[in-house]
Amino acid sequence: MSEPIPESIPTSDGQSKKKDRPRGNAAVITQQSAQIATLMKHPEREVELPHAKRSRGLAPPPEIVANVQGSSAGAGSGEFHVYKASRRRETERLRMMDEQVEKEKRDAEHVAKMAE
């Protein structure tokens, strides 16, 4: 073992002080425990869950595109990012349109199947 000089004597007991503190926000935990206690008072009562949010979709494409590039002018290095962002938005819009058509087709098939 090392000599009992001040540099070799441990200054802490080896345990972190963070372990002593409770984790999380006490107010939130208190609210949750109160809500659970309220729910457990009447276990036969049905619980209403909130509905899922509907997907918003994308904004329609712009009517007028302000930065139209001509074929005779050379595009600078900054124009690439403008083009790439525009292409990404259009691709996303087309993908969402395809998903919507596919969903409508599945819904129509389901309605037809249920009608049989």
Image (cartoon, helix red, strand yellow):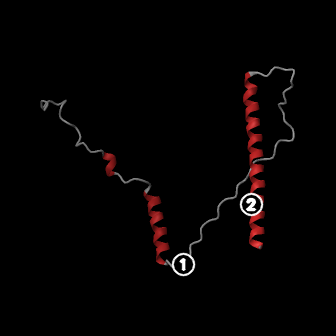
Q: Quadrant of residue 114?
A: bottom right
- Seen at 72% across and 29% down, the residue is 81
Where residue 82 appears, as percent x and y from the top left, is: 75, 31
**Residue farthest along the front direction in this orientation:** 116
Q: Amino acid at mark 1?
A: Arg
Which residue is more in the foreground, 25 or 83?
A: 83
Q: Which mark is residue 45?
A: 1
Marks 2 and 1 in Cβ contact (< 8 Å)? no
Residue tagged 2: 106
Kind of element beneath mark 2: helix
On-image quarter of the N terminus: top left
SS category of the residue bearing label 1: loop
Q: Position of residue 103 (x, y in %)?
A: 74, 57
- 50 lies left or right of 95: left
Q: Residue at x 73, y 35 (%)?
A: 85
Q: Nearer the viewer, mark 2 or mark 1?
A: 2
Residue type at the position of mark 2? Arg
